[in-house]
Image (cartoon, rainbow, N blue to C red):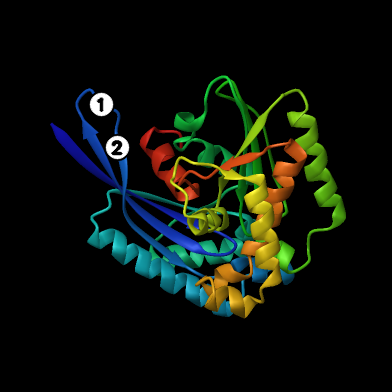
Amino acid sequence: MIKIKKYAAIDIGSNAMRLLIANIVEEDDKDPQFNKSSLVRVPIRLGQDAFTVGEISPENIDRMVDAMKAFNLLMKVHKVERYMAFATSAMREAYNAKEVVSLIKKKADIKIEIIDGKKEAAIIASTDLHHLLKTDETYLFVDVGGGSTEFTLFSNGKMVNSRSFKAGTVRLLNEMVCDVVWEEIEKWIKQNTADYEEVTLIGSGGNINKLFKMSGKLQEKPLSYIYINSQYAYLNSLTYEQRISQLGLNPDRADVIVPATRIYLNAMKWSGARQIYVPKIGLSDGIVKAMYYGKI
């Protein structure tokens, strides 16, 4: 007997907003299957407002309301039975975030919860990571967002430590990440990986997914430090316009991909990792799974 549930997740990030609609297939005596039914990404760069001015601008509030109305209609059409909407770094820092949340509830009938970096890391980690984690190995999970980067260390299949830093791509573009933050990240990674002989990176976020796609590799295969390093140099050698015209990148991806690559590269360097795996996971996948398993 097969039963299908429809869940949706809304991820309100610093660089973009996403709506994931998933089919959860339940079959007797089998693990549930999580299949993507639809994914809509809207490039509203909230971080540009929140990190530079400290509030979400009236123009972006209007765009958010419109996007949420559209998301609500899409969920209705798909007959979604349950959803959750989480906002991360940009909304955490915007002093008018509460007003924006209540306005969206009133105008688009979508309830948004603003979550901290620790909860964000925990939700992402509750995705399919356990399939990837070989019990006898050590992994540093790195999720690069627009406003913050979450680092989680796993060893012997268990989480050892987790930390969120205010070093995201939109912040880096606006030169808002000082040397002290980089030094803190380096110190945290080195201290937490020092006791392990070998560390492998797991990368999450839109930019590493794009880099992986560009490599043409099969999903299970990792990217090497050498590849990431050469891509960083190559991307840096191109202008913003060239990244759009020659590489076919979206305008809101063509600028942030460079600082994102730098974060992954540094994480590999400081942890001594030679390889990075890129599973197709993110906050929205984590929200769906965490909802299903009753973790949120």
Q: Are marks 2 and 1 in contact (CB under 8 Å)?
A: yes
The secondary structure type at the circle numbered 1 is loop
Residue at horizontal 57%, vertical 19%? 136
Q: How many marks?
A: 2
For this orientation, the residue located farthest to the left is 1
Which residue does the image show at 38% across and 54% down from the upper left?
20
Residue 260's x, y, as percent? 65, 57
Return the residue at label 2. Answer: 33
Say whether residue 197 is left or right of residue 218. right
Residue to which mark 1 is pinned? 30
Element type where label 2 sits in the image: strand
The residue nearer to you, when weighing 178 against 131, is 131
The amino acid beneath tag 1 is Lys
Residue 94 seen in the figure: no
Residue 35: percent from the left, percent from the top?
Answer: 31, 45
Q: For this rendering, which residue is in front, 197 or 76? A: 197
The reply, left or right, for residue 120 in relation to residue 149 is left
